[in-house]
Amino acid sequence: MSRRSFLQTMLVAGCAAACPGLSLAQQRPLRMAVHPYNSTLALVATHRPLQKYLEATLQHPVEFYTAASFDAFIAALMAGEYDIAISPPHFAMIALEKGIYAPLVHYKSRLEPLLVVPKDSVVRHAADFAGKRIAMADRTAFIRIVVLQWLASAGLEAGRDYQIVERPSHGASITATVLGEADAGLATTTTMRQVPADIQAQVRILTTGLKFPHLFTLANKRLGAPMIARLQAALLGLTAEHPEGRVFFEKTGFGGYEEVGAEELAALKPYVAPTRRVMGLD
């Protein structure tokens, strides 16, 4: 960015803070990024009510972002490129450790890893995955790290006892199972709610019994304490009773927002080191 452009941007930002009446078109949009757990089109449609609500409540334009891959999202997140980031908890923990972001909220629903199998599959327990092909999204995905440990507790090691079929998203892992490209697909309860009914009708869900705090929403500290406080208040105010909230939570099944508690951060801390190893950050 040139010096002239930089000064113009800073002038607009300063006027926006000093002049609440400044039109939305004249304010620098907040970059709201969502982890690419589904296709871009699905994420845009799902999060449009949230985007509209934040723009109306904050009186500030909000632009939607995602990334082409999990790695691209992580790189941008860790570089502090997003103003608002909706991130899996393990990435959020590492981003918080870097001191770039502040935690705002997480969804009320729990992040529950599950394995989707064809309706006629004989698989019922972790040990039954011996010799099977399991479709999974990126190796850095939180549910993948968790489920690999879950399978290891049954004595199964990836590459030796079962094969991993790489897919670009959790939704694609479900599709691979339906198409017979894999014997099972790793997903979450949230992803399953968002796939078409005809796909859901062809599969059976095998639960792992594991539950964690769901996607975190983070705010970049460069926004400043007043805006961060407004953001948190706006999100906590978005309930199923609000028109946009009703649409958003019906589409996602997230159930609303809760503040991030210290006990939840403590419960996630054991997964930080494995995540850093997988990401090559050690």
Image: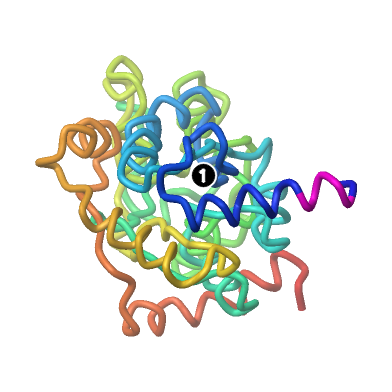
- The spot of residue 258 in percent (x, y) is 25, 64
In this picture, residue 134 sits left or right of residue 211: right
Dot 1 falls on a residue whose secondary structure is strand
Q: For the view shown, which residue lies furthest in the top direction? A: 198
Q: Is residue 262 left or right of residue 92?
A: left
Q: Residue at x 69, y 54 (%)?
A: 10
Q: What's the residue at 57%, 25% (across, down)?
A: 181
240 or 89: nearer the viewer: 240
Residue 4 colored in magenta in the image: yes
- Display coloring: rainbow
Query: Is residue 183 at all visible to an observer of this figure?
Result: no
Question: Circle 1 is placed at which residue position?
Answer: 34
Answer left or right for 34 relative to 207. right
Residue 272 rendering spot, x and y as whole percentages: 57, 76
- The residue lying toward the viewer, choosing from 114 and 71, is 71
Which image quadrant is residue 33 in?
top right
Q: Is residue 257 above or below residue 240?
A: below
Left or right of 24, for residue 121: left
Whether residue 264 appears in this view of the structure is: yes
Q: Quadrant of the C terminus?
A: bottom right
Question: Taken as a whole, is the magenta stretch helix, strand or loop?
Answer: helix
Q: Residue at x 60, y 61 (%)?
A: 157
Examine the image and state in which quarter residue 98 appears: bottom right
Report the magenta residues as a range.
3-7
| Percent coordinates x, y for residue 14 in the rendering | 59, 57
The residue closer to the viewer here, 179 or 210, is: 210
Image: 30 above or below 176: below
Q: Amino acid at mark 1?
A: Val
- Using the image, determine if residue 77 lies above or below residue 96: above
